[in-house]
Amino acid sequence: MTQSNRRTALLFFSPAAVFMLLFFVYPMFLLVRDSLYDSRSGARFVGAENYMNALTSERFYQSLYNTIVFVIGAVTIELVLGLLIALLLSTGFKGSHFVRTLFLSPLMIAPLVGGLIWKFMLNDQFGILNALLYRAGLIDTPQDILWLSDSKYSLLAVMIADVWLTTPFMMLVLLAGIQGIPASLYEAAHIDGADRSRRFWHITLPSLRPVIVVAVLIRMIDAARSFDIIWVLTQGGPNFSSSVLSTMIYNTMARYNQVGYSSALAVLFMILLLSVCGVFMMRLWNPNKNAS
């Protein structure tokens, strides 16, 4: 590469580099710096004290556990439902385009608005979900299940709302992957006498593997940092039963004004998230490693 070509390449790269420095590197530097200070005592340098307080906090581990349950539960349900809907729409039945548009409608709703919708639907006094369960004979009274005010159901409630809101994304990505599989593979399998189940397990699913990995990875990151819909529904309550790391960081920062402690929580959160995503990529992206 000549000197002029290098200068041209650097010129085209410079806007992205400036963007990364201003909106990623510099905020990360401030975050790590703030995590080493105690803002409650005049920005006193405390080193790793905030991190030690976080790692010895019972509430931190409770929020971490809730985050793991929320992410695994929501993403697993979204993957299964998204795959089933994508397989159904890929058949191209009459009216499939209308049904696909209908399924995509939650994507057009902001998480904050979606949370408000589900807050009314899950209300134990006039919510439609309890009314339907009551009419179906599954509960004795419409007030039997306190979705948002009972610690047994609060995390499940926000999970239901998140599944409704983001399953269309999973469905759309998987549908695009299914439509990208060559039809010749199915034709050859049909000639060889393979039924639908064998075609699914030996053609569709292996061909969708890279798409599934990318979709699940994106949704894991997005679900782990979910805040809007959880805050609107439960604000992490009752008794921190639906508190996740994002709501804990917000409460620590906004309500208790513990900038250093909340910054340490955010750093630990990012380290955990990057570690999980790295392991997930290594384990699922390369099937040869799994086989060994």
Image: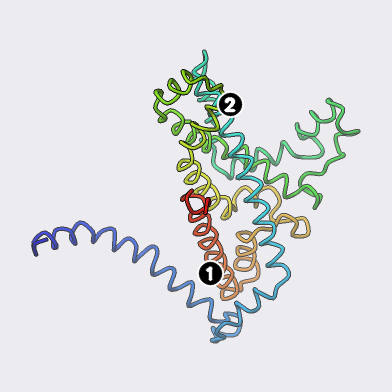
At a point 48% along the width and 71% down the height, the residue shown is 31
The N terminus lies in quadrant:
bottom left
Label 1, residues with CA under 10 Å away: few <14, some 14-19, many ≥20? some
Tell me the amino acid under the disc marked 2: Ser
| SS class, disc 2 | helix
Q: Position of residue 76 (x, y in %)?
A: 62, 43
Which residue is situated farthest in the front direction here?
Answer: 192
> Viewer-proximal residue, 113 or 73?
73
Report the coloring of the rendering.
rainbow
Question: At 62% across and 51% down in the image, what residue appears?
Answer: 71
Task: Find residue 140 and report its horizontal and vertical position in percent.
Answer: 91, 33
Q: Is residue 206 left or right of residue 24?
A: right
Picture coordinates of residue 58, whole percent (x, y): 73, 70
Residue at (34%, 62%) from the top-left corner? 20
- For this rendering, which residue is in front, 194 or 238? 194
In the rendered structure, which amino acid carries the disc numbered 1? Val
- Residue 276 or residue 122, whichever sits in front: 276
Q: Residue at x 86, y 38 (%)?
A: 143
Instruction: Check disc 1 and report its element: helix, strand or loop.
Output: helix
The relative height of residue 41 versus residue 72 in the rendered view (above or below) is below
Image side of residue 146 versus residue 249, left or right? right
Front of the two marks 2 and 1 = 2
Q: Above or below — where is 158 with respect to 183?
A: below
Residue 115 sits in quarter = top right
- Residue 45 is labelled as none
Q: Is residue 223 left or right of residue 191?
A: right
| Tag 2 residue | 197
Other residues around mark 2 within 10 Å, as few (<14) / some (14–19) / many (≥20): few
Q: Which quarter of the picture shows residue 239?
A: bottom right
Q: From the image, tell me which residue sits under label 1.
A: 267
